[in-house]
Amino acid sequence: MTLAGCSLAPVYKRPPAPVPQAFPVAVTGNPASSPSGEQDLDDWRVYFTDPALSRLIEVALANNRDLRTATLRIQEARALYGIQFAERLPSVDGTASYNRGRTVDPSLGENVVASQYRAALGVSAFELDVFGRVKSLSDAALAEYLASVEAQRAVQISLIAEVASAYVAERALYDQEQLARRTLAARDGIYALTKRRYGAGMSTAIELRTAQMLVDSARASLAALARERTQAASALQLLLGDFAVDLPRATPVLDDLTMTPVAVGLSSDLLIRRPDIREAEQRLKAANANIGAARAAFFPSLRITTEVGSVSDGFSRLFAGGSGVWSFAPQLTLPIFSGGRNRANLDLATVRKDMAIAGYEKTIQTAFREVADALAARDQIDAQLDAQKGVYEADNERMRLAQRRYTSGVATYLELLDAQRSLFESGQELIRLKQLRLTNAITLYRALGGGWQKEGSA
């Protein structure tokens, strides 16, 4: 029993994180109000505060099939761990048998027909885990189970981010559709004016056809945006797992969507709490435990078979006095020659651990890059968005002046045409940057693992 407490698995030690201790801080950043680790952002409701978006996320968490599959994988891993853990305990079985046959009695030279009843309770081939082989396999199964839990949380965080991104994309298409409608209305007005001017001999046929072409082009753009928005809504409903969910039709627009800001300069230690990193570490622990099982295969194994029961030639006398039997059969197996199988298994387990270490480190580096990129882009996107707002306002004023000048006959149609084109393009770019700003905030939420939890609060 003392030997059964031994383990040949290497002592696990978490590899150092191959990244800097802190994220790079943006040069032109304004410190945002944030929990800074004091408030738990693990609850997505703290980050995504829009009521319509919150409702969609709740629907997705209840109905999304990928998340449901990840949850079922937890149950699968839990069952596998239960199976493996049961190998550490003896299996007690009850047996009952009846045997009737004819034999030859050598002393009498006669055939004898005899019956035998047998009832017993015993343990069959129970392995005393002298060198920790079964325990190592059980530890590996436990680590795989814990990895599946982290994988499910990673899928949940990814789902929340994907729903938010799909919702923002659908809202952006809605804004672009409204911009296209305003552009179409403005071009309809210019076309009507050009038609009147053409009838009065003040415009050329080229100007009239150009105005008509611009109206038709705006209609085509509006139809294309309507199609894209319908497809975006279907993609969002697929994430929700329910095509019967009604999506918001008019509000909110991108300007109304807000998300809780997160301060820059967060410690890279937060990445250790990201679920995909914790999943990778659990896979590493499983690989480490498998080395212990591979090492134990080089040493003797001790199995015990024991049985206590009763035997009789008549069923009525099966449990009578004097019919009791018992057996105790320990078996020691010493590996002598296996053709190099045990050595190959140990080499395989060692290589898989090295691969798990490399995968763990790569996961950390990828997570660090994702957070650093999102933090670095945030301030630049805000600055670009502020500048684009100025461009759009200037184009809007330019369009108003060009239309007035054209109506008064001062400006040429080419000037009005250029103002129309510039206003539509700057409006589209403004919507794109608003979408990019929100998408970057969602990316930061996802890169941080949906927020973090203080040690011991999980």
Image (cartoon, rainbow, N blue to C red):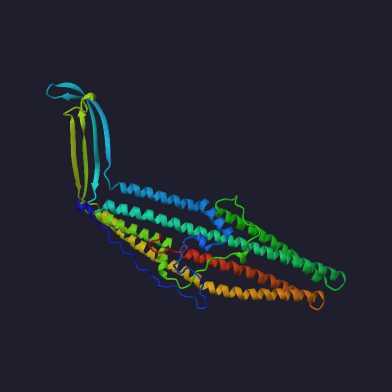
Image: 137 above or below 14: above
Where the C terminus falls, by quadrant?
bottom left
Foreground residue, 48 or 391? 48
Observer able to see residue 207? yes
Foreground residue, 4 or 35? 35
Residue 17 location, x and y as percent?
37, 68
Horizontally, residue 298 falls left or right of residue 286, namely: left
Q: How many numbered callouts?
A: 0
The quadrant where residue 278 appears: bottom left
The residue drawn where x is 72% and y is 67% is 183
Foreground residue, 399 or 231? 399
Residue 175 location, x and y as percent?
65, 64
Image: 236 above or below 378: above
Image: 378 above or below 63: below
Horizontally, residue 212 falls left or right of residue 307, namely: right
Residue 457 location, x and y as percent?
40, 61
Q: Residue furthest left?
A: 107
Residue 179 location, x and y as percent?
69, 66
Q: Residue furthest right?
A: 200
The quadrant where residue 93 appears: top left
Observer able to see residue 344? no
The residue drawn where x is 66% and y is 61% is 225
Horizontally, residue 311 falls left or right of residue 350, namely: left
Horizontally, residue 287 falls left or right of residue 152, namely: left
